[in-house]
Image: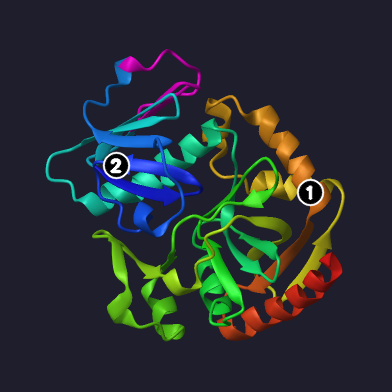
């Protein structure tokens, strides 16, 4: 068994998870919060529920997923993940779906609030950048991290506890080849996420911030047909509407019976954060210039928060 640390969870796993922090590099001792083992992941072990289809069945205590031709997962009581791979499946594919489906489900089960986005630590504040898959949030994070005063918290999933603290994930960004080339990242340090997915893990160990960070500032980044960048502060009900739109995997939230909790958390988060809607051109712009605009706006907001 291997032991890791992510989102303040101690994880014991039969499957190696090299992207996560080894327990030797982290703080924390005692019983693992989550165990990951190989075994039989059978659908018949899950009680009947309305949240089901051919490839999933979700209810609060038992959840089953099948990734066709890859693996089946069975998640029990938010404490154990059983993996039953199809013959000949590579471990990278197992890890990808473990990170994007199973681990978020466990966190939601334990009442953590998940947003679809990445996060950095700036000064004394946590800053989140929300957008949907493939819309450039990781490229923006990588551009910002070129500045040494920014520290990396997470990519793809922004995890908050009940106090509004962003919990550090694991020290790796996910970028496509064109972004790696544009940002002049050393290609000898990158690792392919999965054989059939042209996306790479970029290590961020030196910039990784391993302590929780209070979320104060949120940017919602949306590619549009505009020719320039427009930043619009959101107020009132619009904040809640946008935050609800960017909660991570609403299907998981509904299946675990956390709808009411998540709406409540959206309202609390809207009341204590600055939220800005950022429209950027879909193409024909430079990421370093876009990051500079964000950095300038962020400096002003950090001063307002102090």
Which residue was labeled with disc 1? 270
Which residue was labeled with disc 2? 13
- Circle 2: element type: strand
The tag earlier along the polypeptide, 2 or 1, is 2
Whether residue 305 appears in this view of the structure is yes
Taking the spot 43% from the left edge, 41% from the top edge, the residue there is 103
User: Which residue is farthest left?
Assistant: 88
- Circle 1: element type: helix
Which image quarter: residue 35? top left
Picture quarter with the N terminus: top left
Mark 2 or 1: in front is 2
Tell whether 129 sits left or right of 195.
right
Tell whether 184 sits left or right of 108.
left
Tell whether 15 sits left or right of 106.
left
Magenta portion: prevailing SS class: loop
Coordinates of residue 305 in the picture (x, y in percent): 83, 65
Tell whether 40 sits left or right of 127.
left
Taking the spot 31% from the left edge, 49% from the top edge, the residue there is 95
Task: Check the image and report above or below for 212 versus 176.
Answer: above
**Front in this rendered view, residue 3 or 233:** 3
Q: Which stretch is magenta? A: 45-65
Whether residue 284 appears in this view of the structure is no
Coordinates of residue 23 in the picture (x, y in percent): 37, 52
Coordinates of residue 207 in the picture (x, y in percent): 50, 72
Coordinates of residue 217 in the picture (x, y in percent): 73, 61
């Amino acid at each position: 068994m291997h032991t890791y640390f992510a989102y303040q969870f101690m994880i014991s796993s039969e499957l190696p998870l090299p992207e996560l922090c080894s327990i030797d590099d982290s703080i924390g001792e005692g019983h693992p919060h989550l165990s990951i083992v190989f075994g039989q992941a059978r659908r018949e072990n899950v009680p009947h529920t309305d949240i089901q289809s051919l490839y999933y069945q979700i209810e609060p205590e038992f959840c089953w997923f099948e990734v066709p031709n890859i693996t089946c997962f069975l998640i029990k009581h938010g404490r154990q993940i059983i993996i039953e791979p199809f013959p000949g499946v590579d471990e990278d594919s197992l890890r990808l779906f473990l990170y994007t489906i199973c681990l978020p489900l466990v966190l939601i089960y334990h009442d953590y609030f998940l947003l679809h986005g990445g996060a950095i630590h700036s000064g004394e504040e946590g800053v989140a950048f929300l957008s949907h898959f493939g819309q450039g949030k990781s490229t923006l994070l990588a551009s910002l991290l070129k500045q040494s005063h920014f520290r990396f918290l997470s990519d793809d999933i922004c995890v908050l506890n009940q106090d509004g603290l962003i919990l550090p994930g694991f020290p790796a960004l996910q970028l496509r080849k064109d972004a790696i080339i544009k940002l002049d990242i050393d290609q000898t340090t990158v690792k392919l996420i999965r054989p059939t997915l042209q996306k790479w893990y970029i290590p961020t160990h030196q910039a990784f911030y391993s302590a929780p960070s209070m979320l104060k500032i949120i940017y919602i980044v949306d590619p549009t047909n505009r020719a320039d960048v427009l930043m619009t502060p959101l107020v009132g009900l619009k904040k809640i509407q946008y935050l609800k739109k960017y909660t991570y995997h609403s299907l998981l939230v509904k299946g675990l019976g956390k709808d009411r909790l998540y709406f409540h958390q959206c309202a609390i988060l809207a009341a204590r954060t600055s939220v800005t809607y950022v429209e950027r051109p879909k193409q024909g712009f430079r990421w370093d210039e876009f990051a500079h605009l964000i950095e300038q706006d962020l400096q002003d907001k950090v001063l307002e928060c102090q």
